Image: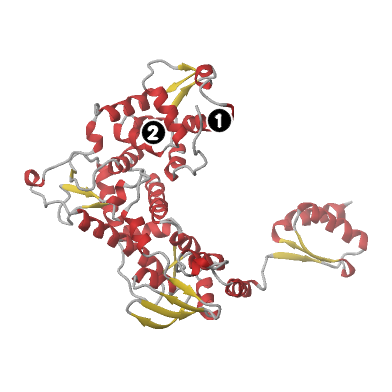
Amino acid sequence: MTVGNTDSIGHALIEFLQLQTQTTLHRLYVRPSASLAILRLLSPLERQLVMSLLWLELPIETRSIGSWVTPDGRSPYEAALKSLASLHIITGSKEQIGLHTSFKTGLRSGLTGSGDVETFGRSVQFVEYSVDAPLSPEALDSYALERWDTILHYMVTSGTEQVAAKPSEGVLYLLEHSGLMSSEQGRRKITSAGFQFLLESPHTQLWVFMLSYLRMMAERDDMDMVDILGFFFTLAMAQSTQQYSSATLSPTQMIMISDLRDFGLVYFPMDSILAFQPTRFAVALTSNSRSVMDEDADRSQGFVVLETNYHVYAYTNNPLQIAVLNLFVSFKARFPNMIIGTLTRDSVKKALVSGITADQIISYLVTHSHPQMKKNNPIIPVTVQDQIRLWELERHRVKGQDGYLYKDFASMNDYEVVVKYAKELGVVLWEYPTKRMFFADASGRVPIRNFIERRTAL
């Protein structure tokens, strides 16, 4: 067995699945749609191991499967086994190895079309169910992008003078719960984590949001994690051009579907949930294929020109991109397809106060730089980068730290003994031996006081 590219970072959902209990995972694996979707999440080497073991009725000797591996592939092979074991996909001992019965049963059913096929969703004909005709692919993509852009645009403009459409209360709660936004005096504003979120690829953004949603749902006692994950995998294996009946959904999944509509993952008319239609957002959850989000992002890549005199020219009419730039650029003029502005001390410090870092501003400018800018090395002028970082340093000239000042020691010996003990604790922040004074962190107050009292009692 030779090893291909196994250095790629594992899918974000894998880490979440590894945190689930063995019972939860085995209940999930018996669903054909879940097993098949999880297979798509695995690395190439892990998939190869699974498929090699899938049709074996009995476990295989570890020595036999180890003979398939070349010397260079030994380390990736052992890492793949460890990963599969953490997901409770494989079972066995040092002598034998095989797939767990639940995963084997679910994956076999998924590949052969047998078993509980309704885990893939029950498709409906709108004529039979008296529901609206399905949206066209173009209309569905437009709907999904509109929902997602509403969330991103609100993140950027909330707390500013700009006005944007407000997402649902469920979305707003999730934005705060995930740390992407914070609320101060009733006003929400984007956090440093939220701005970093905007720098990620659309597919990564979607999964950051979905994992935050999964963690939030896991905290609720009335929600079944198997139903939650099972519905995600059902959507991931669905077809965006097909409508599916809601009759097969559990109570947990009926709660989820309204939330997922707000995220742009599914569509159904507001006045009826008889049937729903997954968008390409949902179908791309466990796929490496490009989603409509990535395609839309590609069309808007590379629009910023930044000069050494801090003038910014943004060739865009995208409201979201304009709103992001407005976080740290002072706009001077606006045309139908271009924005002219300047990076100023006040505009950058306004972003810094919101929790956005200098490196994040520079990263955004590099990521969205115009193709002509990308010919430069470095892409962003060094003078501009240095100035942005200097503006950030202005906010950290003085750093406050709670602590206690120790002084008036009777002798230099007393001072040296106590300060030595404080240094062993690692709490000394400043010392002035000539004046027999030192300043220690507040965490060292009790042990230092006790040490002094023990010496005084001698």
Q: Nearer the viewer, residue 60 or 347?
A: 60
Rendered image quadrant of residue 294: bottom left
Q: Residue 158: image x %, image y %?
A: 39, 70
Q: Earlier in the sequence, mark 1 or mark 2?
A: 2
Q: Residue 363: image x %, image y %?
A: 52, 64
Measure the C-alpha gap from mark 1 to mark 2: 32 Å
Check the image and report above or below for 30 versus 214: above
Element carrying mark 2: helix
Element carrying mark 1: helix
Q: Nearer the viewer, residue 202 or 408?
A: 202
Would you call the spot at circle 1 few (<14 residues within 10 Å), some (14-19), or many (20 or more)?
A: some
Rendered image quadrant of residue 244: top left
Q: Which mark is residue 24?
A: 2
269 left or right of 15 in image: left
Q: Residue 319: image x %, image y %?
A: 34, 71
Q: Residue 350: image x %, image y %?
A: 50, 76
Q: Is residue 89 visible?
A: no
Would you call the spot at circle 2 few (<14 residues within 10 Å), some (14-19), or many (20 or more)?
A: some
Check the image and report above or below for 73 versus 398: above
Q: Residue at x 49, y 44 (%)?
A: 9
Camera-near label (1 vs 2) is 1
Rendered image quadrant of residue 156: bottom left
Q: Are marks 1 and 2 in contact (CB under 8 Å)?
A: no
Label 2 amino acid? Thr
Q: Which mark is residue 36?
A: none
Residue reaching furthest bottom? 332
Q: How many marks?
A: 2
- Give the residue at mark 1: 73
Label 1 amino acid? Gly
Q: Residue at x 89, y 69 (%)?
A: 434
